[in-house]
Amino acid sequence: MEFSEIKRIMSLHYCEDELYSMGYELIAGVDEVGRGSLAGPLVAAAVILDRKRMLFNKINDSKKLTSRQRQVLFKKIISSCRCWAISKISSVDIDKYNITRANILAFDLAVSRLKLKPDIIISDFINIDSNKLANISSTDFIPVSDGDSSSISIAAASILAKVTRDRLMKMFARTYPAYGFEKNKGYGTSEHLLSLRKYGPTAIHRTTFRGVIQ
């Protein structure tokens, strides 16, 4: 591993190192994928990394990685972390609650599924009213600006969420082959919008989102 890469990865540990020095041991990074998608679920991941096994080569915000890099890191993260969990909020529930509320619910559900109760939760999603959430309200919570590029725990959570959601969208592509979900993952590409105009929305489209509404 090149020195510049080691330096970048070590900088991702700064947030966690500060929290460890404050006495926190079980730090849960939480992130989501699919907020801006027109179809498919919102997927959130929560992960508590092992303090002694946190030096992952190439780890970064999932959006800055190739599919292959994400797949490799996904396996390394789940095999070395203390615990991890995934939650999914369907397109029906996103339409019911709105995307912001769905995001909060996804975070709360992912945290509730962790096998270990975290001492603190960190995420770059700022708009969480933790007082209204059963699982997050009972735990310290700190928002981290640009978290998936500045915290190794949040970066790890973003990779778990991204790989999980991409796999789901590839499955949906087999059910709805005309929409290109295996490539666009439900986001509003020109090809996807053309399919929507031609065929209309599927059962997994978010009917309250601009682009789906005709």
Image (cartoon, grey):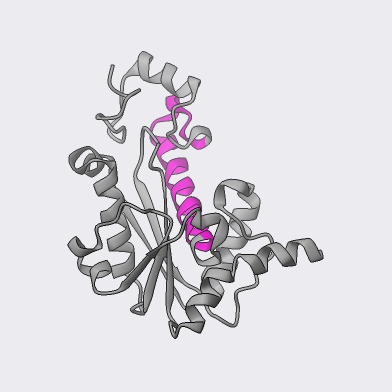
Q: Which percent across, then down, holds residue 6?
A: 73, 67
Let me know if residue 170 is in the magenta part.
yes
Q: Quadrant of the N terminus?
A: bottom right
Left or right of 134? Residue 152 is right
Q: Which percent across, then down, holds residue 44?
A: 38, 55
Residue at point 44% right, 41% down? 169
Q: Nearer the viewer, residue 146 or 208?
A: 146
Vertical order, 149 against 35 (above or below): below
Residue at point 24% right, 57% down? 129
Let me know if residue 165 is in the magenta part.
yes
Write the start and end of the magenta stretch as one range.
155-182
Q: Which percent across, then down, holds residue 110?
A: 33, 63
Most distant residue in the right direction: 2
Vertical order, 64 against 58 (above or below): above
> Is residue 184 at all visible to an observer of this figure?
yes
Q: How many marks?
A: 0
Q: Nearer the viewer, residue 106 or 39?
A: 106
The secondary structure that most of the magenta stretch takes on is helix
Left or right of 59? Residue 137 is left
Instruction: Determine the image quadrant of residue 199.
Output: top left
Instruction: Determine the image quadrant of residue 141.
Output: bottom left
